[in-house]
Amino acid sequence: MMKELNRMCMEFPAKSCNEGFARSVVAAFATQIDPRFDELSDLRTAVSEGVTNAIVHAYSDQTGERQLVRLECVLYPDTIEITITDFGKGIEDVQQAREPLYTTAPEMERSGMGFTIMETFTDDMFVESKPGQGTKVFLRKVFSVHK
Amino acid sequence: MKFELSKAGTYLIVRIGGELDHHYCDIIRNRIDPELMEPPIRNIVFDFTGLTFMDSSGIGMLMGRLRIVQAIGGNACLICDNKNVLRILEMSGVARLFNRCKDISEAVRGA
């Protein structure tokens, strides 16, 4: 087992102004293990995609009050694990959603590249979703620090 | 995010710096589109010099503006030297769809 160094959890409303906030928080948190600049850039991009997905899609069918995104990070000596959770409408077909260029919101000019970029820019990605209950995206990024 | 619009002949020049994500794409789109409807504008230049971050929202925004200028018989040009931004543009295939220029004067030559 890798030694856990630190962890954090935060929740924020699913508002687009929080996209920059979320990726900056994760980058600042990861700085504790001194990752390479290009790897930190990849992480920022992946987090931005995941959080933007939650903000654009999760609550698009409702006007409920609890429209939150939860962001959890666990830090290990050379690895960060990130979980992005929403409590929205969920994804009917996760496999289809992960296909490059697939989007449910072409009218909003969504490119359908979000999952592809998350997958490319991290080392592991898992998606768990239940229609009506929300979506959880898990990302793991291994940095080349201490090597 | 830094954003500036200017015009040169038939060219609309869009300078974007800082970080471009879904939040700012929505704002920028609403500023660009009315200008593209104003003759004699029919070409667009995106100057990404100074852009430090872009995610897939930027791809959608670029593709949308490309469709508009193609519909009015114009061209779209892109100036970008940031490695991370270029990676996203190339991964998605968007980079190939734009004329690539090194600076504004090359992009609007003959305007």
Image (cartoon, rainbow, N blue to C red):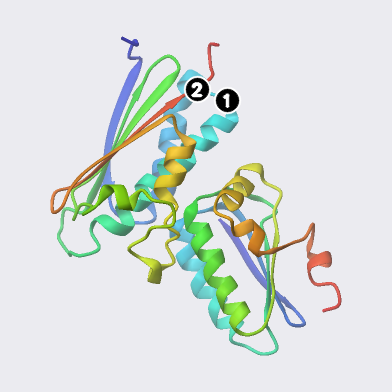
Nearest the eye: A140 or B27: A140
Q: Between disc 1 and disc 2, whose residue precedes?
A: 1
Spot the residue most to the right: B110
Which residue bears the numbered disc 1? Answer: A36
Q: Is residue B54 left or right of residue A76?
A: right
| Badge 2: residue crowd in 10 Å (few <14, some 14–19, many ≥20) | many
- For image coordinates 53% across by 16% down, the residue present is A145
Instruction: Give the image location of residue A38, x and y in percent.
Output: 59, 32
Q: Quadrant of the C terminus of chain B?
A: bottom right
Label 2: element kind:
loop
Q: Is residue B55 above or below residue B24?
A: above
Q: Nearer the viewer, mark 1 or mark 2?
A: 2
Q: Amino acid at mark 1?
A: Arg
Residue A143 is tagged as 2
Q: Is residue A107 left or right of residue A130?
A: right
Residues at discs 1 and 2 in contact (Cβ within 8 Å): yes
Instruction: Give the image location of residue A35, x and y in percent.
Output: 53, 23
Tell me which chain the residue with mark 1 is part of: A
